Image (tube, rainbow, N blue to C red):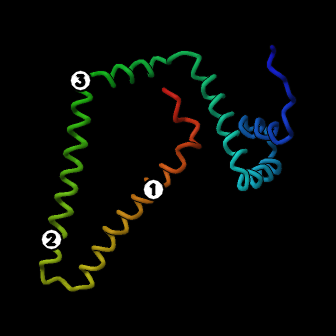
């Protein structure tokens, strides 16, 4: 039994041209408006972009890619990165906690205490929202399955 062959629809042809960057500016804007309301079409574009990236990946590693892989396996590099991130995180948390404690137990004006707290809270909120957005859009990222 042979698989049935069907011609791609007009929308599928547009998705292919969009993924390849072949649409004229006006066609691109029109197709992007269509993408806003069509989750299935967005997934099709992601699938096509992944195929293009996988085809490029099949070409073989570049010398810089081999060096990055070697570095990733180097125990000194791995230990240094782990220690560096741990020190950075612990130092930042301890510094923020100490600064917050000193600020709130001092005789500083309430407005200063509130404004400093709102800066730290705003930063934490923006970071949390950026991480949330990254998690929600990860399925649409054509680079998630690509190894350099």
Q: Is residue 51 left or right of residue 122?
A: right
Q: Give me the C-alpha separation between circle 3 and circle 2.
A: 38 Å
State whether residue 23 is above or below residue 129: above
Picture coordinates of residue 145, whole percent (x, y): 52, 31
Q: Give me the C-alpha separation between circle 3 and circle 1.
A: 31 Å
- Contact (CB < 8 A) between labels 3 and 2? no
Picture coordinates of residue 42, whole percent (x, y): 68, 45
Callout 2: helix, strand or loop?
Answer: helix
Q: Is residue 112 left or right of residue 33?
A: left
Foreground of the two, 14 or 109: 14
Callout 1: helix, strand or loop?
Answer: helix
Residue 130's label in the rendered image is: 1
Residue 75's label in the rendered image is: 3
Dividing the picture into quadrants, the one containing residue 100 is bottom left
Q: Earlier in the sequence, mark 1 or mark 2?
A: 2
Residue identified by numbered label 2: 101
State whether residue 8 is above or below residue 32: above
Callout 3: helix, strand or loop?
Answer: helix
Dividing the picture into quadrants, the one containing residue 128 is bottom left
Picture coordinates of residue 30, whole percent (x, y): 80, 53
Q: Earlier in the sequence, mark 3 or mark 2?
A: 3
């Amino acid at each position: 039994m042979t698989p049935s062959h069907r011609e791609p629809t007009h929308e599928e042809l547009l998705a292919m041209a969009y993924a390849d960057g072949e649409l004229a500016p006006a066609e691109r804007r029109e197709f992007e408006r269509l993408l806003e309301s069509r989750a299935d079409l967005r997934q099709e574009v992601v699938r096509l972009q992944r195929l293009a990236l996988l085809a490029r990946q099949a070409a073989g590693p570049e010398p810089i890619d081999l060096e990055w892989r070697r570095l990733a396996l180097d125990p000194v590099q791995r230990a240094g990165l782990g220690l560096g991130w741990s020190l950075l995180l612990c130092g930042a948390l301890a510094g923020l906690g100490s600064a917050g404690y000193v600020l709130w137990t001092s005789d500083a004006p309430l407005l200063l205490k509130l404004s400093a707290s709102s800066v730290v809270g705003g930063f934490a909120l923006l970071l949390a929202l950026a991480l949330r957005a990254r998690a929600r859009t990860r399925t649409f990222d054509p680079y998630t399955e690509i190894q350099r």
